[in-house]
Image (tube, helix red, strand yellow):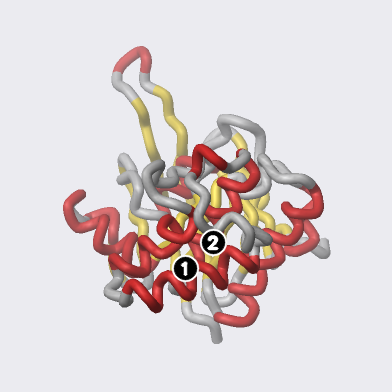
Amino acid sequence: MSRLTLRAEGVTKTYGTGAVAMQALRGVDFQASEGEFVLLTGPSGSGKTTLLSALGCVLKPTSGRVMLFDEEVSAMRESDLPRLRLAYIGFIFQGHNLVASLDATQNVALPMRLRGWSTEDANREARRLLERVELGDKLERKPAELSGGQRQRVAVARAVAGAPPIVLADEPTASLDAHTGLAITELLKSLAQEGGHTVVVVTHDSRIHHLADRIVEIEDGRIVHPQSGAQA
């Protein structure tokens, strides 16, 4: 039986207070296991990215619990969360979040270096991953020298560098053409299938639905179709 890696129980998130308060999540229950590839779908503003950020220890919920493996991360101090993100989570942000002063290889190598890899080993693995996302000819290019789609592919390579047990992606195919978007999604799917990683992807891209083990739909801060599968 696959081990449960991520769990949200009754999670709420409210931004602001009083008359201007906006409730992004309204009592969400969610879970994902080793080897599972899950898509989070729903209209803009439905709470998908907020849920992903809570699962990824990027923000703390207003109430409810978030569990990472057997550890309740929602009860931890903010200062403890970067350690957990580095150890367990690869995150693909919608805005890429690459380091402008580093080239593509250095950006991808960075999380591995922070985890204690040698420079030589980290750079070797970074080059391999960049070749896998079809950027083998852009190894020494800095983000400003890359297109939006190329920067997104660097971000994907960085997120999977060192094979973290959990990969969370916010619209990873948004700035990619159909061919590259499918290839990136297949790479993420292979992480789940072959390596036993948990992969959760926020997406509006219906072209990749067939790859999901489960599709979880969110609307108005609530999960409305928690168990709908790709083949349903």
Q: Please give the name of the residue rendered at 67% of the width and 40% of the height, measured from the top-left corner.
A: 175
User: In the rendered view, does 60 fall on the left or right side of 203?
Assistant: left
Is 214 above or below relative to 19?
Answer: below
Say which element carries label 2: helix
In the picture, the quarter occupied by the N terminus is bottom right
Q: Position of residue 201 (x, y in %)?
A: 59, 54
Q: Please give the name of the residue rendered at 67% of the width and 47% of the height, measured from the top-left corner.
A: 173
Q: Position of residue 121 (x, y in %)?
A: 40, 78
- Residue reaching furthest to the top: 19
Residue picked out by circle 2: 157
Amino acid type indicated by mark 1 = Ala
Say which element carries label 1: loop
- Residue reaching furthest to the bottom: 1
Q: CA distance from mark 2 to mark 1?
A: 6 Å
Q: Position of residue 52 (x, y in %)?
A: 48, 49
> Which quarter of the picture shows residue 164?
bottom left
User: Residue 181, can we see it?
Assistant: yes
User: Residue 224, can we see it?
Assistant: no
Q: Please give the name of the residue rendered at 28% of the width and 54% of the height, measured from the top-left corner.
A: 74
Name the one closer to the observer, 48 or 178. Answer: 178
Q: Position of residue 95 (x, y in %)?
A: 50, 38
Query: Would you call the spot at circle 1 few (<14 residues within 10 Å), some (14-19), or many (20 or more)?
Result: many
> Which quarter of the picture shows residue 222?
top right
Q: Please give the name of the residue rendered at 60% of the width and 53% of the height, measured from the top-left corner.
A: 153
User: In the rendered view, does 124 fall on the left or right side of 44?
Assistant: left
Query: Would you call the spot at circle 2 few (<14 residues within 10 Å), some (14-19), or many (20 or more)?
Result: many
- Labelled pair 2, 1 in contact (Cβ < 8 Å): yes
In the picture, the quarter occupied by the C terminus is bottom right
Amino acid type indicated by mark 2 = Ala
What is the count of numbered marks?
Answer: 2
- Per the rendering, the mark at residue 15 is none
Residue picked out by circle 1: 161
